[in-house]
Image (cartoon, rainbow, N blue to C red):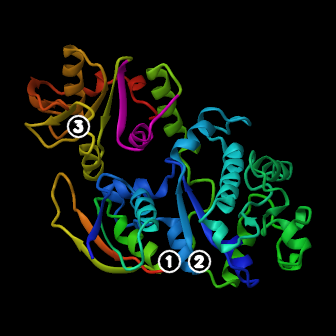
Amino acid sequence: MLAAKVIADQGIAVEGVNFFTGFCVEGHTHAIRENRSKRPKRNNALWVAEQLGIKLHIIDVIEEYKDIVLNPRHGYGAHLNPCLDCKVFMVKKAMELWLSDGFMSEHGFDFIITGEVIGQRPKSQRKATMPLIARESGADDRLLRPLCAKFLPETLPEREGWVDREALFGFHGRNRTPQIELARRLGIEDWAQPAGGCCFLTDDSYSDKLQDLWQAQGVRSYELDDIMLLKVGRHIRPAANFKLIIGRELGENRYLEGYRKQFPALKLESHKGPLCLIDGTPSAADLLLAARITGRYSQGREAEQIVVSVNWPDGRREELTTTPLPKAELAPEWLIGA
Amino acid sequence: MALETLDTRGLLCPLPVIRTQDRIRSLAPGSMLVVTASDAGTLQDIPAWCRVHGHRLVTTEQTEEDIEKGRTYRFTICVVEQ
């Protein structure tokens, strides 16, 4: 937001590009969870674009991004976050959009800006990685970082005089106070979440669930539904052959409802309770255990008996009468990413 | 002019916005597109996207809440020449 504002204030036409990888945090978590309804359900990139009065192109890169997550050339950060490869990918993708017919090229764009700040992130935003991103993306000296430009060599837009280098900045490090002060000077009073907390791949719990998925599949791969479901509910794996996804509140239960044609679903019939999807190939004994675990998270957790329906994707339905699993029998190691 | 339709129910933002953006790119100015969604975030995002790109949001409607499925939202957008 700040980088775009700094450049736009120099009288340069700016348009935004936002890439949807499938791993974004804010929008989906808020969209799914009912108990977060007091927070605005909005796409932050769109909101920022509207505040700045610029166009925003939101691009679906889910398929292409898989290779970045699965085979990062520069490795992962603290969890499964391939931040450096991600930055290279996104700048490269912006270049492709710029060069592609009928898209950004029709607007005659001349260079790319990002909001990167040297030293803000320990792996991907270092002085050494800045030229690497420019080089590997193919953007080279058409990539300008207005917020830390004074620590970097002149880029094409600076050399050509399209941008006044003197009006750019020399921010560095993790302290965001200078950026916040600049934002206020520029009349920006509200802003979206600062970078770094916006990707599920930086989250240890989410990364544990993704690792578990790969281990259970026996192969490192994913589809969009896989990574969306990792954002929802409690994930409980009592055995290698099946996993439960149990909604934690109304919004999650509603979201999981949408997957009943893909997964067997358990539902409490005798008490109020969550929806539980079963991912895997459960035996009859596994189904009974799944029903008991689902009961553990229902209002029937202390009941002598519960009735749970098993709803198969092909329309078959059966009912199981059983007892809720006592807390002591719920093994902590079954809870993935807890 | 016939109404074009786009069903994004079951998708979470930003996918309904992306699908809307991609569909509108293929429509002629003056076309009308009706987008159906289940994500409450579209109430903010579809109007915001229309404002950012200069398209005209003609109507926004929502159904009564269904306890299991939540609400359905329907947006009618008039495509404006860019």
Query: If the image is split into quadrants, where does the N terminus of chain A sit?
Result: bottom right
Residue B33 place in picture, x, y as percent? 32, 70
What whole-number distance in Å separates the C-alpha atoms at marks 1 and 3? 37 Å
- Magenta range is A221-239
- Which label sits on residue A116? none
Task: Specify whether residue A233 is painted magenta.
Answer: yes
Q: Which of disc 2 and disc 3 is earlier in sequence?
A: 2
Residue A335 place in picture, x, y as percent? 40, 29
- B78 above or below A129? below
Q: Quadrant of residue A248 in the image?
A: top left
Query: If the image is split into quadrants, where does the C terminus of chain A sit?
Result: top left
- B53 above or below A289? below
The residue at which mark 2 appears reads as: A54
Few, some or many residues within 10 Å of mark 2 (<14, 14–19, 20+):
some
Disc 3, SS: loop
The residue at which mark 3 appears reads as: A261
What whole-number distance in Å separates the C-alpha atoms at marks 2 and 1? 7 Å
Q: Is residue A80 visible?
A: no
Count of numbered badges drawn on the protein? 3
Q: Residue at x 32, y 59 (%)?
A: B39
Pointers 1 and 3 within a single chain: no
Q: Amino acid at mark 1?
A: Val
Q: Is residue A315 left or right of residue A62?
A: left
Q: Is residue B54 visible?
A: yes
Pointers 3 and 2 within a single chain: yes
Q: Is residue A214 left or right of residue A296?
A: right
Residue B48 place in picture, x, y as percent? 44, 75
Q: Residue at x 28, y 28 (%)?
A: A327
The residue at which mark 1 appears reads as: B52
Q: Amino acid at mark 2?
A: Ile
